Amino acid sequence: MQKEFVVLNFKRFRPYLVANAPLQRLYSGVMWAEGPVYFADLGVLLFSDVPGEKILRYVDGQEPTVFRQPSGNANGNTRDRQGRLLTCESGNRRVTRTEYDGRITVLAERYEGKRLNSPNDIVVSSDDGPRLRNPQRLHGKQGAERDRAAMCFSHRPEERRSGDRNRRARQTQRPRLLA
């Protein structure tokens, strides 16, 4: 019988567990799931079915339902400080924000005139700026246009107030994770 979960480094994983909370499988209807983001105020967990081209919505005790399809091969998801969903769409090679009314706003798809490769992971920093990982590979394609792997975009509050939509970006070689 195959184990349901394998924890490769329990010592590092242990601080994230609650002593009496068992790990449990919530859903198995995807080939490859990524980008979980929890909306505690709504009691909803969103996660991406990357090859399935959809973002799913999970509510405790119910089967997941489709939140968005197609999703542009959505991968990494997070919330901004205003509670909106930020998504890395690796297939569309862009980063988007889902507004409160459901409209999609493109936050980034180019840097220095070149398209993003395959935005993958995203977090929001303390200055409210999204930080994303943009690997050198393209989602299912060859020929990456960027020569560096990560780009960090900052939408500072003072820039938003002044209407300045310019973004600062910093590039790093081969990042493995964002924090």
Image (cartoon, rainbow, N blue to C red):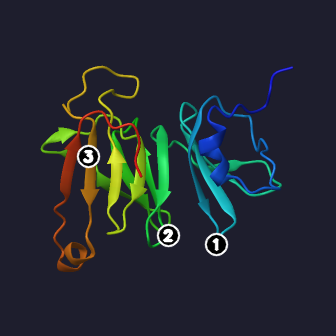
The residue carrying mark 3 is: 151
Q: Residue at x 25, y 21 (%)?
A: 143
Viewer-nearest residue: 103 or 26 = 26
Marks 1 and 2 close (CB-CB < 8 Å): yes
The residue carrying mark 1 is: 41
Query: What amino acid type is highlighted by mark number 1?
Result: Asp
26 to 140, vertically: above or below: below
Neighbour tally class for label 1: few under 14, some 14-19, many 20 plus, Cα within 10 Å? few
Q: Secondary structure at mark 1?
A: loop
Disc 1 to disc 2, how far (Cα)? 9 Å
Q: Choose top left, top right, bottom left or bottom right for residue 116.
A: top left
Q: Secondary structure at mark 2?
A: loop
Location of residue 107 in the rendering, given as x and y in whole percent from the top left corner:
31, 56
Q: Of callouts 1 and 2, which one flags the residue occurring earlier in the amino acid sequence?
A: 1
Location of residue 13 in the rendering, given as x and y in whole percent from the top left corner:
63, 44
Q: Of callouts 3 and 1, which one flags the residue occurring earlier in the amino acid sequence?
A: 1
Q: Residue at x 23, y 40 (%)?
A: 172
The residue carrying mark 2 is: 83
Give the number of marks.
Answer: 3
Quadrant location of the N terminus in the rendered image: top right
Side of 150 where 42 appears, left or right:
right
Query: What amino acid type is highlighted by mark number 3?
Result: Met
Viewer-nearest residue: 132 or 164 = 132
Q: Of callouts 2 and 3, which one flags the residue occurring earlier in the amino acid sequence?
A: 2
Neighbour tally class for label 2: few under 14, some 14-19, many 20 plus, Cα within 10 Å? few
